Amino acid sequence: MLTASSWSRRSDAALAVAEAGDRLTARLGGRPSFVVVQHTIALAADQVAAALAARFPGVPLHGGTSCQGVMTEEGFIADGCVLGLFGVLDPDGAFGVASAELGADPEAAAMAAAERALDAAGRPGERPDLVWITGAPGREERILGGLRLLFGPGVPVAGGSSADDAVAGGWSQFAGTQVHRDGVVVSVLFPSRGLSFSFHSGYDPTAHHGRVTASSGRTIHTIDGEPAAAVYDRWTGGVLGAARQGGGNVLARTTLTPLGRAVQDVGGIPYYQLSHPDQVTPDGGLTLFSDIATGDEVVLMRGSPETLVTRAGRVAHSALGDGTSTPAGALVIYCAGCMLTVRGRMDEVSAAVRSALGGRPFLGCFTFGEQGCLPGGNNRHGNLMISVLAFHA
Amino acid sequence: MNQPNRQPGADPERLREALLDLDRARSHEQEARLVSEQMVACLRLFTSHHTADVLMPALLGTLRAVLGFSDALVLFPDQGPGLVASFATAPHLVGSRWRGDGLFFRVNPSRPVALFDIAFVPEWRDQPDGVRDEVRSALHIALREPPNPAYLVCCHPQVGFFGRHHLHLASLFGPLTAHALDDLDLRREVERLRATAR
């Protein structure tokens, strides 16, 4: 199995696809068996998808938008028009891609897309080694729920929620030439060689914790009976500032202090799923980028720019497992919030991933939600997380 | 779940990674020990059971403990291109006939195939209700390659029961089961030659 990445900064979608596509084919030395596409919203998704379908006819294409740029083994490529490609050359493997509008029933949409992806791969009913997803932000837990209904409990799922540059709803997703604004793209992977994965954050728990006593969907109304924003502001030493009283967007202020929930225990060590507070509501609640339930125990987590810079490389290293396999390349999901916090050091982040992968190709994107498989096989959606999928040579 | 102790000067991230590595290594060691014990159990069967009628039920019983299937069948070539179940854990599965193409082309000794839901698979949809009843997921293991193929098909009533772990175990125990079949063939051939010599 071979992999390669390529990118272009051309502002014309057709020219960008031609440039990145030619480079990808040259690096692979042949027609790819599967291509993952990430681009910024400065390029029109329908034009990117159409040009790619013409450039790679019959090749499964899995696409989505990334916040402000992408990263590869060549560094951080950002601002304006950016197109990144990751190709897998694996004639003995099988890959299928399909998509669906999320609509009123995201579970059913995810199941339908996965069934079509399996048909496209020529493997109906067969357990894929991994399911790679790109969804619109907002209902990721329901997408994972649909995939669990279809596949049962043991199929790992990883991926990221498509993003725009300013949380303004400009994201998109595509499978082949089918473009969505509120959809899910599902790829089923049956590589001829192995793959491995890891899903982590760069945050540590603090001593501050409490129980969610009122919630709805992605909003925490109260923690231990007090308005959630007041509790959170006290725990963090006042990061909400004026927004605590007046409400509004607090996304950038809360990136280093998300809320965590211990979702499982590995070797006596709790594994935390993170939720990023993004708004203070008029009633003093906090909205998050992931679902929360009344009764959940939340812990204030703390990160630092240093851990956000080094963590991606460590997650990539962890994704390689016991070190008995040689990586061919990797897909990296890195939270857009983390990227924006350490934007000036993103070349260090990509260098850390490159080093962990031994210089092999990779494509990283910046997402508004991350999905991955925890040790023990639980698929989760979280915020401020890093998900790495390594293909073995 | 407990909060981890925060010790001044400790690097919690590295500590957590080390503990996770330790836990992973411990799990691998436990699994390796269990697998080797089960392999020894299989090998003991080979030396103590010398005919198919005795060995195959005992072998399927041991494999059931390893792979956790509810039922299993062993398929051999039928007259023509198809396959027939010569041994099974349940009487109603014995004699079931299967197409030998499609899915079975993809299964080889180094690559078992797990089906998360047999309802999507033509080879399973062809089966009568009696065979499909109580089966939602399956694991197909090639024991021998064509022109004299043999397959072990494991069944379970739960969707998606057979996962990555089962595929790994299948790659270990498939060759062992194949060896049992080869051993039976050799014994049969020896008996035939002895009879001819007499």
Image: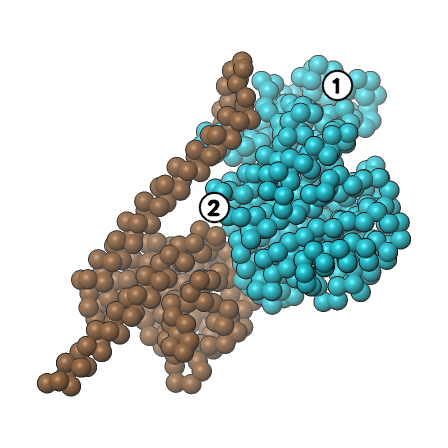
Chain colours: A cyan, B brown
Q: Residue at x 75, y 66 (%)?
A: A57
Where is residue A263 drawn, in percent x and y? 55, 34
Tell me which corner region of the image, top left, top right, bottom left or bottom right, holds residue B191: bottom left
| Residue B151 in view here | yes
Label 1 vs 2, first from the N-terminus: 1
Q: Residue at x 29, y 57 (%)?
A: B62
Where is residue B114 drawn, in percent x and y? 48, 60
Q: Nearer the viewer, residue A307 or A219?
A: A307
Where is residue A314 drawn, in percent x and y? 59, 34
Q: Is residue A222 left or right of residue A164?
A: left
Q: Which residue is mark 1?
A: A239
Q: Which residue is mark 2?
A: A324
Q: Amino acid at mark 2?
A: Thr
SS of the residue under disc 2: loop
Q: Residue at x 67, y 36 (%)?
A: A351
Tell me which corner region of the image, top left, top right, bottom left or bottom right, holds residue B77: bottom left
